[in-house]
Structures are given as structure tokens and as C-alpha cells.
Image: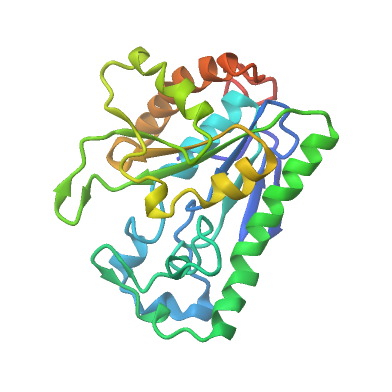
């Protein structure tokens, strides 16, 4: 599902983070904090069984695949974590308990119980700081190239949470800066068959806007977080359809804000 950009332009900045299509010249920088379910061997599987390690608690199924499609369409770099969010959730600051959660929905995480300050710092240094450095470096590099940057982070969520069905299919999330979210939601009528909602199934009160604040708002950049219900992106056809639908919202929103992009990537893989 998904793949590398034509020509394979991926920078491995560390074992914990990848940068796909770093030379993309479009107006968007994509993030995917929960792209992988990998748990490095030194953490001994966090004491989880195979089912838990593969579940939505460990990663955001389909999110990286959709982000890769958007990277092509927007000629956009993508910064993605290579490590399970149960080891360290790159959308949380180090001081947050949920950065290394002891429980995710109904799944207890034995390997995250009673972590010492030293253990927490080791994970922060190994996973979180390389991810943040890769994003910051990309923003600085783009600024030096004279490129405008809009931060868009891609996530997915489970359709059933604590036994309750979630009606929302596409969530458009924002913190104090709602400009890009507002512009995207203004285009929701273009997708009448989709249930699109603001700050649902999560919102700022749930602590999910850390990346938006750190990489977007703090740098004065337009920003938005997109949540996709993961039953819609389980195969290549679903991923391709969702990426196309998101472009239906993103492209005119960028135009509304006077940002470059407009849905036409200029890179080699833009129409792949």
C-alpha cells in the first residue's frame, strides 16, 4: 500500500524517522507521527501480544499510505515516524503522560509501567527529538529556498472506540489557528457523501494538537490535522480514493489562503 516516490528519494535521518521526497517544491509539508507499528527489539515488545502490537493502539493504519499519495499529488515532503506511538507518541511533548501511555483504549501496555526518568529520556532522545529535528530542519530548508510551507499532519482513527461507533469519517482538527481548517470545511459540500466534522473525533482538549502548535503555530504557518476513519483506508483502492477526496478539500483551501499548491504537484511523482 503506497510506496516510495519514483526514484526512491527517501532520507533516513535516523532509525526512528524518515523523510520522503525531501526536495518537494509544493507548498505543503506533510507529517505522519503514527506511521508505523515497529517496536525496536530493546523494548521487548512492550509486553504486548501480537494482536495488540498490530492494532490501532500501536499505529494509525492507512495514514502513511494516504500521506504518500498526498506527497505525490502536492509535490510535498513527508516526515514520518518509523516507531510505534506506544514507544513514544511524537504528537505529544515529553512531559505528557500520554507520550508513553500505560494504556491505550482497552489495551494495557506493561512495558510503559513505572518508567524511570532515565528510561523516558532515552525514548525521548531516540524517537521524539529526531522526529522534531527532521521537521524543523525541513521547515528551515524550505524557508532558505524561498518556499512557502503549510503544515498538514495525517492520522487515522478506529471506527469503534470503547464500544461506541463513530459516525465521523473525516475529521478536520485545529488548535487556536483555524484558518486552514475553516477553508477546508468550507469545501465540505464537494464531498456530500462523507461525514466531515470539525475537531472530531478528537480536539485540542484531548492533547492531540501538539505538532500543530510546535511546528505550525509557533512558526506562523497555516496548519491542520486530518483524521481519517481507518475502515475507509484498508486497501489500495480505499487509500487512493481517500487521497483524491482530501485533495478536493485541500487544493481549494490552499487557493483561498493564497498558498501555493492548488492540487497540482510539480515533482516527478505528482501524477503517480
> Please, is residue 104 above or below residue 11 in the view?
below
**What is the tally of numbered marks visible in this picture?**
0
**Left or right of 147, for residue 224:** left
Please give the name of the residue rendered at 54% of the width and 58% of the height, measured from the top-left corner. 90
Image point (49%, 51%), residue name: 35
User: What residue do we see at 60% from left, 70% from top?
Assistant: 124
Q: Quadrant of the C terminus?
A: top right
Is residue 236 something one can see in this rendering?
Answer: yes
Q: Residue at x 70, y 24 (%)?
A: 267
Q: How far from the left and from the top, in percent, is residue 269?
A: 64, 26
Check the image and report above or below for 26 versus 153: above
Task: Determine the residue located farthest toward the front in the rendered image.
Answer: 176
Q: Is residue 230 above or below residue 46?
A: above
Asked whether 139 or 228 is in front, the reply is 139
Quarter containing the N terminus: top left
When the figure is inspected, residue 7 is found, relative to residue 95, above or below; the finding is above
Q: Nearer the viewer, residue 236 or 23?
A: 23
> Which color mode does the image show?
rainbow
Identify which residue, 49 or 147, lies in the foreground.
147
Q: Position of residue 215 (x, y in %)?
A: 63, 46
Position of 225 with respect to 5 (left or right) is left
Q: In the visual, does 100 lie left or right of 217? A: left
Measured as percent of width and height from the top left, residue 45 is found at 42, 76
Q: Could one spot residue 15 in this view of the protein?
A: no
In the visual, does 155 lie left or right of 5? Answer: left
Measuring from the top left, give residue 41's x and y in whole percent: 51, 76
Amino acid at each position: 500500500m503506497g510506496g516510495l516516490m519514483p526514484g526512491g528519494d527517501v532520507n533516513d535521518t535516523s532509525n526512528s524517522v524518515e523523510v520522503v521526497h525531501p526536495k518537494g517544491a509544493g507548498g505543503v509539508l506533510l507529517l505522519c507521527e503514527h506511521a508505523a507499528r515497529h517496536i525496536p527489539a530493546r523494548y521487548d515488545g512492550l509486553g504486548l501480544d501480537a494482536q495488540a502490537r498490530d492494532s490501532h493502539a500501536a499505529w494509525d493504519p492507512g495514514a502513511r499510505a494516504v500521506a504518500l499519495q498526498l506527497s505525490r499529488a502536492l509535490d510535498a515532503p513527508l516526515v514520518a515516524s518509523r516507531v510505534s506511538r506506544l514507544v513514544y507518541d511524537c504528537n505529544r511533548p515529553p512531559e505528557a503522560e500520554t507520550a508513553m501511555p500505560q494504556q491505550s483504549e482497552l489495551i494495557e501496555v506493561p512495558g510503559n509501567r513505572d518508567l524511570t526518568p532515565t528510561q523516558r529520556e532515552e525514548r525521548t532522545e531516540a524517537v521524539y527529538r529526531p522526529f522534531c529535528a527532521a521537521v524543523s530542519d525541513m521547515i528551515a530548508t524550505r524557508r532558505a529556498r524561498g518556499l512557502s510551507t503549510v503544515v498538514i499532519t495525517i492520522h487515522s482513527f478506529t471506527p469503534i472506540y470503547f464500544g461506541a461507533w463513530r459516525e465521523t469519517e473525516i475529521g478536520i482538527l485545529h488548535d487556536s489557528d483555524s484558518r486552514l481548517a475553516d477553508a477546508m470545511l468550507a469545501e465540505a459540500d464537494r464531498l456530500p457523501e462523507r461525514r466531515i466534522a470539525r475537531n472530531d473525533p478528537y480536539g485540542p482538549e484531548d492533547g492531540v494538537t501538539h505538532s500543530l502548535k510546535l511546528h505550525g503555530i509557533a512558526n506562523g504557518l497555516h496548519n491542520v490535522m486530518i483524521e481519517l476513519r481507518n475502515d475507509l483506508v484498508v486497501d489500495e483502492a480505499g487509500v487512493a480514493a481517500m487521497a483524491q477526496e482530501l485533495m478536493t478539500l485541500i487544493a481549494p483551501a490552499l487557493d483561498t489562503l493564497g498558498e501555493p499548491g492548488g492540487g497540482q504537484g510539480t515533482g516527478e511523482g505528482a501524477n503517480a
